[in-house]
Amino acid sequence: MGRTLIVVGLVIAAVGLLMQLGAPIGRLPGDFTIRRGSVTFYFPLATAVLASVVLTLVLSLVARR
């Protein structure tokens, strides 16, 4: 459990670093933004799918050890 938490923390830190460097995380094609007057609704579908795939791969690699 401890190793898994460390790996998840490192992944989150890496994603944060990529966002600081200008990677388009959160603005992928497939992320929906709906603006109606003063209300904005944002649904990051593609970003959620990408995050799920990456976390699944990372956790499966950690679980094998």
Image: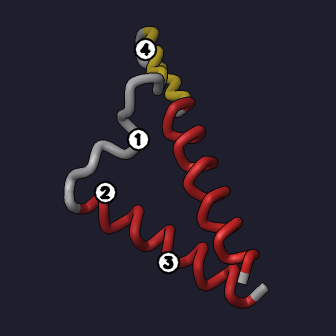
Name the element at disc 1: loop
Callout 2 crowding tier (Cα within 10 Å): few <14, some 14–19, many ≥20 = few
Q: Are marks 2 and 3 in contact (CB under 8 Å)?
A: no
Callout 3 crowding tier (Cα within 10 Å): few <14, some 14–19, many ≥20 = few
Between disc 4 and disc 2, the foreground one is 2
Q: Position of residue 16 (x, y in %)?
A: 38, 65
How far is disc 4 from disc 3 in space, using C-alphas? 34 Å
Q: Position of residue 55 (x, y in %)?
A: 61, 59
How far is disc 1 from disc 2 in space, using C-alphas? 9 Å
Residue located beneath label 4 in the image: 35
Residue located beneath label 3 in the image: 10
The residue lying at 58 percent from left, 79 percent from top is 7
Q: In the image, what residue type sits under mark 2?
A: Met
Between disc 4 and disc 2, whose residue precedes? Answer: 2
Callout 1 crowding tier (Cα within 10 Å): few <14, some 14–19, many ≥20 = some
Name the element at disc 3: helix
Q: Position of residue 3 (x, y in %)?
A: 68, 87
8 relative to 60 in the view: left or right: left
For the residue pair 64 and 36, the one nearer the viewer reads as 64
Residue at the left extreme, as displayed: 21
Q: Is residue 63 above or below residue 41?
A: below
Name the element at disc 4: strand
36 relative to 59 in the view: left or right: left
Residue located beneath label 1 in the image: 26
Between disc 1 and disc 4, whose residue precedes? Answer: 1
How far is disc 4 from disc 2 in space, using C-alphas? 24 Å
Residue located beneath label 2 in the image: 19
Task: Look at the image and tell me in which quarter the N terminus lies.
Answer: bottom right
Between disc 1 and disc 3, whose residue precedes? Answer: 3
Residue at the right extreme, as displayed: 1
The residue lying at 42 percent from left, 10 percent from top is 37
